Amino acid sequence: MGMMTIRNIPDEIHKGLRERARRNKRSAEAEVRAILEETIQPQAPLRMGDALAELGRKAGLSDEDWEAIANIRDKTPTVPMRFDE
């Protein structure tokens, strides 16, 4: 594993880091590792269903609203495109 030394950390930043580490019940060094990991590691991909559900919650849609949308939706099966005509 790599090692790193960080010099000249402003006192307010160092104090805030120690406080954050205390709240999370870990050492300042472990807190820095956690911050780096959260920052650098790629986020899990956003799944479309989760995004749509969150959008509905933010819009304040209820189950009754979704039922109304489902009732007015066109349910006619689609016809595949033909390229030979």
Image: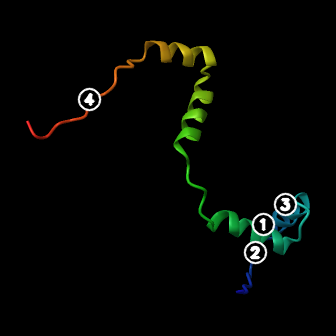
In this view, the mark in front (4 or 3): 4
Residues under numbered marks 1 and 2 in contact, where contact means CB atoms less than 8 Å apart: yes
The quarter holding residue 52 reads top right
Residue occupying the far left of the picture: 85
Its colouring scheme is rainbow
Q: Which residue is mark 2?
A: 9
* Three-letter residue code for mark 4: Val
Where is residue 1 shown, x and y percent of the image?
72, 86
Where is residue 11 shown, x and y percent of the image?
81, 70
* Three-letter residue code for mark 3: Arg
Quadrant into which the C terminus falls: top left
In this view, the mark in front (3 or 2): 3
Which of disc 2 and disc 3 is earlier in sequence?
A: 2
Marker disc for residue 20: 3
* Three-letter residue code for mark 1: Ile
Which residue is pictured at 81% across the width and 68% down the height? 31
Q: Which residue is mark 4?
A: 79
Q: Which residue is mark 1?
A: 13
Residues under numbered marks 4 and 2 in contact, where contact means CB atoms less than 8 Å apart: no
Marker disc for residue 82: none
**Above or below 31: residue 72:** above
Which residue is pictured at 42% across the width and 17% down the height? 73
The quarter holding residue 13 reads bottom right
Which of disc 4 and disc 1 is earlier in sequence?
A: 1
